Amino acid sequence: MSSATVKSKLSRKDFVTDQDVRWCPGCGDYAILAQVQKLVPELGVPRENFVFISGIGCASRFPYYMNTYGFHSIHGRAPAIATGLKITRPELSVWVVTGDGDGLSIGGNHLIHILRRNVDVNILLFNNRIYGLTKGQYSPTSERGKVTKSTPIGSLDHPFNPISVALGAEGTFVARTVDVEAKHLQDIVRRAYEHRGTSFVEILQNCNIFNDGAWADLTEKEIKADSELLLTHGEPLVFGKNRDKGVRMKGQTLEVVQLGNGVTEADLIVHDEKDPTLAFLLSMMGPPTFPTPIGVFLAVQRPTYEGGIEEQIQKAKQRQGEGNLDELLNRGDTWTVD
């Protein structure tokens, strides 16, 4: 989030670059780019105060297509670069765009540390459950048994759950949306921007070339309503084409129930995005037993990393005065070498 405000009204055109968008025709990245370009003019931030930072992967071409400042950095290291930038320029609105491979494989360590530090940065993780840029190898989120070019007889890896990882690292804002859900995607990204601290948004995204239909249960109209659970703070967990199914507690676990025959909405869990225990239980839901939740899992407040650093700097200045670089370099033990 940035405190600076824009003087003249911006439009989507102001954020469209002259670069040819080089994703495969039909890629879900186009839909995400379009919604972000529509949203950012509404945030009231000067265009020069936006910075988009990426690593390596299909999603990581994003900074080229946003007419803002940006970095196309190295594999998995975007969170580290974003952390350094936000600490030194806290007034900037800093965004990390990454993928399931870039963010959860080589970049997994950097991801968990930016989350635990609570740097005021917005992270958009595109999850298509495949390595698309390198032409179809399995990724950290590919399902067990997935047959790919690098796992010709099926993956043996248990996949990462990005939401569970973010919650386990004690992220303060954790959410999920879908590439083709235009309004929902915009609403979630707006909430992420408004949050003070690290916001983590998993965007379920389709790679129609190397993993087409990875999220078909959430995008096909015929089955979507029975496969998707929309999380709304303060509302019971109801889903289904006829809004006749719900989720309730059964002991220490969750279960899906059919409404009616004595079961009412009063028996269901009411979503509370301030409850980290509930958020983690919801993060573990998915097919075939459960619907897939989308929305805000958790939104809580904790001091930001860059805020703590600034506080330390001010206290040091009060105690020791303004710094002097020459004195700093020459104090303590020194040697003269002939």
Image: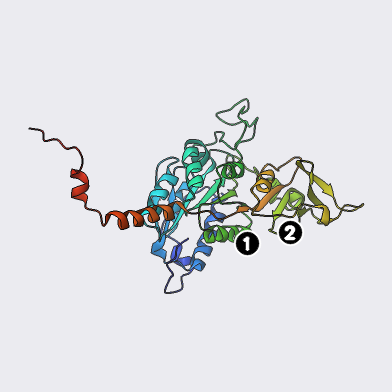
Q: 10 Å neighbourhood of mark 2: few (<14), some, or many (≥20)?
A: some
Residue 171, given in percent of the width and then of the height, sits at 55, 48
Where 307 sits versus 146, above or below?
below
Label for residue 87? none
Whole-Å distance between the Cαs marked 2 and 1? 19 Å
- Quadrant the C terminus occupies: top left
Query: Which residue has dot 1 on it?
Result: 183
Which residue is at 76% across, 56% downward?
A: 236
Query: Which residue has dot 2 on it?
Result: 235
Which residue is at 62% across, 61% downward?
A: 183
In contact (CB < 8 Å): disc 2 and disc 1: no
Left or right for 131, reference 273: left
SS of the residue at dot 1? helix
Which residue is at 73% across, 41% downward?
A: 287
Residue 106, given in percent of the width and then of the height, sits at 47, 36
Kind of residue sitting beneath label 2: Glu
